[in-house]
Amino acid sequence: MKKRRTTGAEREDRILTHRINKLPLINVLSLTLGSVLYAAAIALFLDPNQLAPGGVSGTAIIINYLTDLPTGMVVLCINIPLMLLGLWKLGVRVMLSTVFCTVLSSFAIDVIARWGALTTDPLLAAIAGGALLALGMGLVFRAGGTTGGSDIIVRLIKLRYPYVKTGKLFLLTDSVIVAASGFIFLNIDRALYATIAMVVFTYVLDTVLYGADGAKLLYIITEADQPIAARLLELDVGVTYLKGIGGYTQHPKKVILCAMHKQIFPKAREIVRQEDPNAFMIVTSATEIFGEGFKDHHHQQL
């Protein structure tokens, strides 16, 4: 009897089920806790003080001000078409944790909002809200997820225009929303406080979770070089093979060399851990990298 050939969709489902079963409990807890902290930052500090620091959450805060609709519900409604588009363009495996975090954080925003604002001082709200937002986002990132919104939009734009730098896309979308909040709230001070929240968010996320370095440079020596390289490429990270020879065995080896923005490093480290727990990986800090995806060769030093 001829054996039926497994389809691509069936193989994808098997891989997805296998990875879900392997998902450590700590990752699920990190996704959950990070989503709740993300929601708390919006519900207890930013939304009550009309601070819209960019992204879908900032858009939802503005819509809440204009219509009095619950902010969490607005976040979810905005994210639903984005998640459907992401599932279509990026696939189920990439979007699974994003759907979980987006739905959980959206409902948590409206539940936590019943407690009321913890402070009515806009400066304190900007600092505390930005820091808590970064902590929640960092836990989600470490577990390999995102909170949807701008992350999905940027990834989809990158599919169409891969040469546009990710950081510029985030800065553009967030700046437009912050500027719009100043006009809609008829209060330029609110927009300036929202800018402070953005700066605090960026600083805390970079310093506490990823360090102060500009980028990470990885050397990976492993027997699983092909699956690791394939999954790193899915992160939009360039991969280069170097030829190596074991000093003791004299056997030829492939060494994976890749440079990445520090925000991506936790995901890359998890990929190496999953594919080859015995891999030898050297991680160094790169203060400057020139080339595609990083600084232009004509970049001027300030």
Image (tube, rainbow, N blue to C red):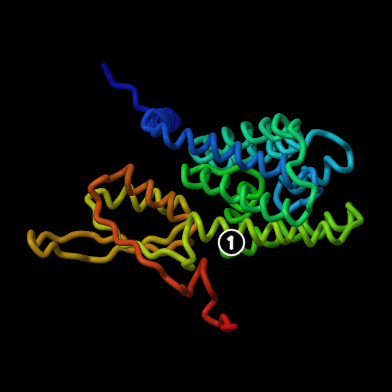
Residue 270 lies left or right of residue 249; in this view the side is right
**Figure check: 212 above or below 264:** below
Q: How far from the left and from the top, in percent, is residue 169?
A: 65, 60
Q: In terms of secondary structure, where does tag 1 sit?
A: helix
- Residue at the (23%, 59%) spot, across then down: 254
**Figure check: 227 above or below 114:** below
Q: How far from the left and from the top, in percent, is residue 6?
A: 36, 27
Quadrant position of the C terminus in the picture: bottom right
Crowding near the residue tagged with mark 1, few <14, some 14–19, many ≥20 C-alpha atoms within 10 Å: some
Q: How many marks?
A: 1
Instruction: Give the quarter of the image for residue 32.
Output: top right
Q: Is residue 87 visible?
A: no
- Residue at the (70%, 43%) spot, across then down: 42
Q: Is residue 150 visible?
A: yes
In this view, which residue lies farthest toward the right?
186
Residue placed most toward the observer, 175 or 190: 190
Residue placed most toward the observer, 101 or 295: 101
Amino acid type at image mark 1: Tyr
Q: How far from the left and from the top, in percent, is residue 161?
A: 61, 60
Task: Please give the residue where the numbered disc 1 appears in the rendered image.
Answer: 203
**Figure check: 91 above or below 242:** above
**Figure check: 29 above or below 197:** above
Residue 19 lies left or right of residue 127; in this view the side is left
- Residue at the (75%, 57%) spot, across then down: 123
Quadrant position of the N terminus in the picture: top left
Residue placed most toward the observer, 51 or 115: 115
Q: How far from the left and from the top, in percent, is residue 260?
A: 45, 62
Residue 262 lies left or right of residue 283; in this view the side is right
